[in-house]
Image (spheres, rainbow, N blue to C red):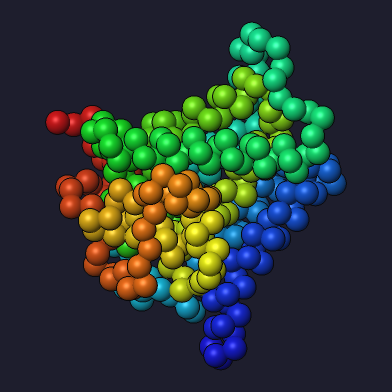
Amino acid sequence: MSALMKIMLRYLFYPLCIAFTLYILTLIVSEAIPYWPTAILMILGSGFLIALVERYMPYQRDWLESHQDTLTDIIHAVFNLFLIVSVAYLVEYLNIFRFFPRLWPDQLAWYWQLAIIGLVIDFGLWLMHYLSHKYKFLWKLHSIHHQSSRLYWLNAEKRHPLSALVLAGPSLSLLALCGAPSTLIACWMMLMAVHLFFQHANVDYRVGPFKYIFAVAEVHRLHHKHGLGRKNFGEVFIFWDVFFKTFHYEDQKVQADKVGVRSPIPNEYIGQLQWPFKK
């Protein structure tokens, strides 16, 4: 790969992919294209593109090799991506339990509504992520996400189903009960899924000062580093960590053998589902 191509990938790959995802999002909101199957095609397409770039510009070459985790990670991804693209229907279902007047500011432009949705979801994820590292049973559920001894794009969707419910349930329920548009919630989840692939990607990309705003791989790798798990809890935005003083950044490269948890969590999918309930 030429030096120019590496520079372009390093600094433009993430912003261009996110910009394209936002463009697709606007087409969905304007009903120019349908949410289904566009969302799942967008998510899978971005994942496969990231997987390809990982081969050409890896952050750690050792992380390109399977650590007896690939099949399990694929199963996690299939199940959790199904939940993500189904969120619009789940929100519509929750609307029947709304027993108080509609509180959502429908009069705002759709992009301001999307911004509110994004902030509510992201803060809810940050808070529940923080608590998942603080309390024992929540940690046992969440530790499945930290089980891998490497970081690559599929790690983004590696989580116990109950942990996914704990992380996203409170903020999604609040938005649904307030009457937030299900399509906008679903579009944010699509955008977040693409971002999370980048957050865990084994790609040596950079965002400069934007690493103090967005929870990209530069800062999220440190969350998976041995001894630093209680830092950088942000999902899409990292400024929650800056505000609550849980942000950490260092220039030193995260070594290939310094991620994961020192715990006998099995590699098999069913074993990982059962593990939090074992003594």
Farthest residue, direction left: 279
Residue 100 located left or right of residue 11: right
Quarter of the image for residue 228 reads bottom left
Residue 157 located left or right of residue 182: left
Q: Nearer the viewer, residue 10 or 39?
A: 10
Percent position (x, y) of residue 204? 46, 74
Residue 44 located left or right of residue 66: right
Work out whether residue 184 can be spotted.
Answer: yes
The residue sitting at 56% across, 91% down in the picture is 2
**What number of labels is visible?**
0
Image quarter where the C terminus lies is top left
Residue 170 located left or right of residue 149: right
The residue sitting at 32% across, 73% down in the picture is 252
Farthest residue, direction bottom: 2
The residue sitting at 30% across, 40% down in the picture is 133
Percent position (x, y) of residue 206? 51, 71
From what the image shows, is residue 219 above or below residue 109? below
Work out whether residue 52 can be spotted.
Answer: no
From what the image shows, is residue 94 above or below residue 50? above
The residue sitting at 42% across, 61% down in the picture is 219
Percent position (x, y) of residue 61? 36, 76
Percent position (x, y) of residue 91? 62, 26
Q: Nearer the viewer, residue 240 or 140?
A: 240
